[in-house]
Amino acid sequence: MLDASVTLAWCFENEATPYTEAVLERLGDTEALVPAIWPLEVANVLLAGERRKRLTEADTAHFVELLATLPITVEEEGLTEALGPVLALAREQGLSANDASYLELAARRGLPLATQDGRLSLAATRVGVPLVS
């Protein structure tokens, strides 16, 4: 499982950390699963980066090409979970619905979660979802 906070750190040089780079390297050996919200979150941040002049359209295109080469699978089944388990988990853990979608998918699939989001990390620990270290 991979969230947008880790993904986007690969795009913005000043946001990359040893953790995010290690997760990227692991994608050479394993596939990442992301919820249906992930492409929209990534696209939104890329657009914001362009509008704030942190990225050019060419930078965005290059990053999108990089993402296309990585073994990342978007799980669309989770859309049906949005108004049930995701909403309940968001309420229970004090998360946004977006963040809860990552947590719900990781819990449902029994996968560890790669995130840099502190609140999401704490919620994952509380519900027994392991974190990628």
Image (cartoon, rainbow, N blue to C red):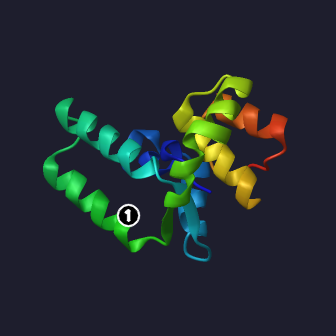
Q: Assess disc 1: are there few (<14), some (14-19) or many (≥20) residues with their C-alpha within 10 Å of its C-alpha.
A: some
Point out the image quarter for the N terminus. bottom right
Return the residue at label 1.
Answer: 67
Tell me if residue 87 comes above or below residue 13 in the rendering: above
* In the image: residue 80, left or right of residue 13: right
Furthest-left residue in view?
57
Locate residue 4, reporting x and y percent. Answer: 48, 45
Q: Secondary structure at mark 1?
A: helix
Q: Residue at x 21, y 29 (%)?
A: 52
Q: Residue at x 36, y 46 (%)?
A: 40
* In the image: residue 119, left or right of residue 129: left
- Residue 105 shows in the view: yes
Locate residue 133, reporting x and y percent. Answer: 73, 52
Which amino acid does the dot numbered 1 rest on?
Answer: Leu
Q: Residue at x 61, y 68 (%)?
A: 26
- Tell me where residue 95 sits by quadrant: top right
Locate residue 83, reporting x and y percent. Answer: 57, 37
Q: Residue at x 50, y 42 (%)?
A: 5
* In the image: residue 16, left or right of residue 86: left
Locate residue 19, reporting x and y percent. Answer: 61, 50
- Residue 10 shows in the view: no
Tell me if residue 87 comes above or below residue 105 in the rendering: above
Closest to the observer: 53 or 76? Answer: 76
